[in-house]
Each structure stands twice: as C-alpha cells, then as structure tokens.
Image (cartoon, coloured by chain):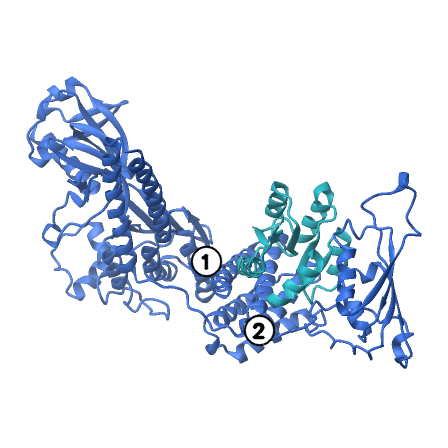
Amino acid sequence: MSKTILTVDDSASLRQMVRMTLTGAGYGVVEAEDGVDGLAKANARTVDMVVTDLNMPRMNGLGLITELRKLPAYRGVPILFLTTESDAGIKAQAKAAGATGWITKPFQQEQLLTVVRKVLG
Amino acid sequence: MAAPDPVETFRHESQELLEQLEQALLDLEHRQGDMELIDSAFRALHTIKGSGAMFGFDAVAAFTHHVENAFDEVRKGKLVASSELVALALAAKDQLRILLERPAEADAAAQAAILAGFHAIVQGGAAAPANVIAPAADGAAAQGWRISIRLARNAMAMGTNPLLLLDELRALGPARVTALADDVPPLEELDPTDCHIAWQVELGAPCTRAAVEEVFMFVIDEMTLELTPLGAAAPPPEATATAPPPTPAATPTAPTQATKSAPPGDSVRVPAGKLDELMDRVGELVIAQSRLRQVAGASHDVQLRAVAEEIERLSLELRDTTMGIRTVPIGQLFGRFRRLVHDLCRDLGKEVELVMQGEETELDKTVIERLNDPLVHLIRNALDHGLERPEERGEKPRRGRLLLSARHAGAQVRVSIREDGRGLDRARIRARAEERGLVAPEQVLTDQEVFQLIFEPGFSTAATVTNLSGRGVGMDVVKRTIEALRGSIEVSSTPGAGTDVTLCLPLTLAIIDGLLVRVGEGRYVIPLTAVEECVELDADAEAGGARCNFLNLRGSLIPFLRLNEVFGTPRDPEKLKKAVIVSAGDQRVGLVVDQVIGDHQTVIKSLSKLHADVEMFSGATILGDGSVALILDIAPLVAFGQAHEERLMTAA
C-alpha cells in the first residue's frame, strides 16, 4: 500500500520538486501552501508523514508541528522539516515542537528520498 | 502532458516574490517598523534563497543570503528598516531580477557595492558566511562496534520508528540485536506510545563511528548512544573519547546531479495571434456543442445524450480555461507603477500619494501587456508636467495625489490616470498647435479637441525638457497603441485642479456574455455588461408612437429607441414590447425589442473590413442553430438615442 505524504511549503517550485521526487518513488503526495492549509489537509485525512517548510505565511512550520502533535492521530507520525544551514538553533526549536527530523536545503532528490525512507521506512 | 519543470516554476515564483518584496519595501517607507511588512520581505528573500539554491541559482542564493541576513536582523529588532536600508534592498531586488532573468548581464561590481552597503549597515551583525565547517574527520574504522541505544521516552510519539533505526544498523553489516526490557514499567503504568525498551547491538562490520552515529542523526541529541569498538583492532584514538558534538549534515552522499545545472528553460510566450486563434476555435467548439445539445435533446438515444453532456462539460471547462489564460487582473500592471512613481518622485523632487482603485478589474492579458508602455508615459507626464512641486501647490495639500483606476463600464474597461496638479494649459496648447500648423488660427475647437492635440506627433509644451518626458515622444505613441487596441483616449482637465486621462478599452475578449433579443426576423446580441434591466413597455408608451419616446422608469425619464425603426425592419405585430435598458458611461437608453430570448455566450466574430464603418454593430456571432446574430455596439447606440431625442425636442 502506498503511503501518503503531506508536503507543506509556500514555495510552489519546492512543492513541485518534492512532489515529483516522492511520487516518482511511489508515495502519494498531498500539497499544502502554508501552515493553516497544511493543518486543514492533515485534518481532512491522516497522512503517513509530513514534510514541512519552516518559514511560511499565516502559520509557520513550528506552529504547524506544534498543532499537529496536539492531534491524537498525529502522535507518532513522522514530521520532517526543511531548513537552511543558517537556521542554526531553529532545529532545536522544531525538535522541541515535535519534529522527527530535518532535511537541509538545498538538497538533491536522492537526499530527500534517503531521509524519507529513513524515517518512514 | 509533460511534467512541469520545477526550475520554470521557480522562475515564475521568484517573479512574484520579487514583486511581493518590492511592495513590502515600498510600504515600509511609509510604515517603518511594521512587522508584517518586514516579515513579508524576509519571507520573500528567504524563499528566493532557499528555492534558488535548490534549483541551481547559486549566484542568486549567495547574493540573497546577505540581504536576507540584514532583514533577519531587522526582524529581530536589532536593526531599523531605515530608508537607507530600504533603498539598498530595492537596488538589491533589481540586481536579483537581473540575476534571475539575464544572469549573463549581471553586474558583479554593482552587487558588490550593494553587499558592501548591507555590510556597513549590519556592521558586525550576524553576517557570518553560510559556509559551515568542513565535516569532521570520520575517524578510523573499527572491526565492529558494540552499540547501546536508549531513545528518549517520547521518541516514538515524535515519529521516530526504532525498528527502522535497527534496520539501518543491520544494513551496515551483520548485527546481533538484544532488546533490554529492564526499564519497562508495570502494565498499569505503561504508556503504549512511550519508548521503554533499550537495545544492545553488536555490529560485526568495519565501519566508522560517524557512520553509526549518522543512523541516529535526528535523535542523537536526546538519546544515550554508547559505542565501544569490538575485536582486536587497534583502538582508534577517539574511540574512547566522548563523541564529538554532532554536526548533523543530512547529506550522507552528495551526488552531483544534472538538476543542478539545468539549462535555463524559457517560459512559453505565445504570440497574441495564436491565443486569438485558440479562442476562436474554442468559440467554434462551443457553438458546435450547443448544436449538438439541441440535436441530442431532440433524440431519445441515451448514449448520444450522455456523450453530449460530457462534451458540454468539457467544452465549457475548456472555454473557461482558455479565458483564464487570457485575462489577468490589472493590479499586476498597476503594481509595477508603484516603483516608477516612487523613483520619479525622488528624481523630480515631488511628493505624491499614489492611490489605486479597481485593481481586480480583469483585462485580456495581451491588452494588459500592451498597456504598460502607454501607462508609463502617461504617469511620467502626470508627474512631470501635471503635478507641481510641493512649494508650488499653493492652497492644495503639499502632497499631490495620483489616482490610477480601472473599472468596467458597459462593454469597455476605463483605465484612468488622474492627478490634482496644475491642469492643462489650453491657451498654450492652442498656441503651440498653431505654431506647428496643426490647427488654423480661426478654427473653433472644443476643450476635448484641444486636449486631444497633445497626442499629435512631436507635440510638447513643456518649457524645459527633462530627461523623463517633454521631448514630444510618447504621447503620440500612446495614442497609436490605444487605437491599435481599438480604444480611445478621453482627456478632461480643470486649470489648477488637475487632469484626468482615461483610456477606454473595448473588452477584446473573444467571448462575452450577451443578451439575445429578437427584432422582427433578426436576432441581435446586447453585451450583458451594458444591460441594466429589462422592462415591459406599457401600451401607452407604445401607442404614443414616434412622438413619445420617453420611458418613465421609477421617476426618471429615459429615452428609448425602437430598434425596428433604427434597423428599418417591419414592425412586429406582437403587442407587448420589451425595452432593454442599457447604459454607456453615465447615459442610459432603452432599446425596444420584440422579444428577449435570454442570455447567450457570444463568440465575437469581427465584421469584414467592408463593414468596419458600421457603427452600431461591433461584430457578429453564430447561434446554436447556425444562424447569424449581430452584436450591438452600445456606445454609439446610446449616443444616437440621445441625439435623436434632442432632435425631436428641438423639432417640437
């Protein structure tokens, strides 16, 4: 059974790249363009994993992670966040909010898949 | 359909982000310290940097990084968004645009100067380069490791799957895993989502400490991980030392990918003619589809009906999509002028408040693109010639006002540029026109005619020529461009109070919503945008014949035209007539028709050149049954109706 991943990013190009990579590897993908949208989509159907950007309008990634972890259905669901190297310190914040792991931007498609497989199996 | 190219998406996205950045920066000038604006600017920069690096725009990412840093400082309250910083950021934004669109033309010196400016502002702030310390040495490989693992209690709730971690260890080499259940609480205290079990793994493979630690990269900070080398291999020096602080790099291997150097794909720019052609075909399709619907409706063939419905849905969707390709809100265009106005005001030493209205008004994309240059000229003119310097404005507020507005009026879109400056100098225009031989000295001209003279080639009344306008180039080009769009220009001006230049553009969309009416045997389409309402003409008005041509509509008198008289078609014997009230500009007129059939999606077919001077019809359309209906051009009809009325009044 193919697993579904929710990708949350305000950058359309990044979402597109993530979607292409993940669907190419056989995952189902749901897209959302910011935290508010992401939370709504995560509520609409429970996904197997969430990959979210941190810096987004309306609700940022930290907010989204915090909100998701409050939902019983999202206990134990892996949440990855995308970050840049200059965001030192934010990793700790995101982890404290409940993130499972991270991917450092810029990344190649393989790297994304490696991390997704590592966390999602 | 080929998969869209993310690089292409990024290009489009970055355009929008740059516009968002510019808006935020321009607004910041007036609302210094507005966190929302600062956040918006920061986010735009952040995304350009992040996504730019993703898709091989390394120069963009590197350059943006420094600008982003400065805004990060602002965001944290360590820096103030001074006008100096904003000006620098605007310059940086221009450089970014060049880097994104024409990297070959990028000006390294200008970039360096901008970055130096930022550096000077930030000064000792967190402008550390993005380069991270080179990855620490892996350390020598041991024969194998004994690894004891204890994850954080909440690790599983946070999405970590220990089984996957163990699988990863197994992938490194032959492993013997022992679970340590000593810490599992009694059942009544057990929280099933907590992780109570620890593991001991004997990994019989020569791999580095770093390789093992990398398996736990996401959880290493919250767990206990002990590594002891196995076997007789000489213990590497750091094997007994405490683990170095992990600098997790999510890049186990970094294969250089072709995507990195993806060639700059070019967006699909389609000649306007091809879009017109597409719209034409879609229009034909919609017509054919409505005929199909009629045929299918008359038949009892269920399959045929099903197919007809399917085709109807598809063709309507196709039509909407095609229309969607063509129309964009004019706000996109207006947005570009904020910067222009800002820069011009600075150069000209004028103070102007720019107000925009009706940004959501949608216009054909090709029209919008072609409106850019005329509007730039008109705005320059307004700022340069129209508006006075603050000290010259007398009793008016020091700050001038420039209003850019767009609205639908009937089947037209009216885009106007209005300022509250000195107004046009009628006498001077007249003198200049006579000097240039454009008008004879004795010729009598209305204001409108005089004002139109400014659109004549080589016409300029500016006392001093600035580098912006006043060389007489431009206004005639404006007029030509607008006329090429089948539009017209209206100028009104009051001395001392300002000038209003309005561009009236026809809706050149190939499909419009129309009201289908019947007059005698013929059918006609009235553009729905011009229709205000339909009323039944009472017998009195009808009986009044040619002498009574007014309709009393809720207390206001509206002249009406009997279309059968105007078109010279025989009167329909049917007694009850309908009047369709249409408006053009501020004027209204009733059109008396024999029957109102209903609304109708109309595909405009232009009339042949031979019929180009037929004023009352703007085009024709083909109806579902294959017959032709003419499309009424409302503005001339209303003018005709009003004039007709005046003639009757004076004759009476």
Question: Residue B468 bears which disc, if any?
Answer: none
Callouts 2 and 1 on one subunit = yes
Q: Element under label 1?
A: helix
The residue lying toward the viewer, choosing from B58 and A118, is A118
| Residue B56 location, quadrant | bottom right
Q: Residues within 10 Å of mark 2 (few under 14, many from 20)?
A: few
Chain appearing in blue on the rendered image: B
Question: Residue B257 bears which disc, if any?
Answer: 2
The residue lying toward the viewer, choosing from B202 and B496, is B202
| Chain letter belonging to callout 2 | B
Q: Amino acid at mark 1?
A: Arg
Q: Which residue is mark 1?
A: B338
In the image, residue B276 above or below residue B587: below
- Colour that chain A carries in the picture: cyan
Q: Position of residue B325 (x, y in %)?
A: 37, 53
Q: Residue at x 58, y 63 (%)?
A: B45
In the displayed structure image, the side of residue B377 where residue B144 appears, left or right:
right
Q: Residue at x 32, y 60 (%)?
A: B370
Does the image show residue B73? no
Mark 2 vs mark 1: in front: 2
The residue lying toward the viewer, choosing from B632 and B262, is B262
Q: Position of residue A82 (x, y in %)?
A: 66, 60
Q: For the residues marked 2 and 1, what is the alpha-carbon distance in whole angstroms? A: 41 Å
Does the image show residue B76? yes
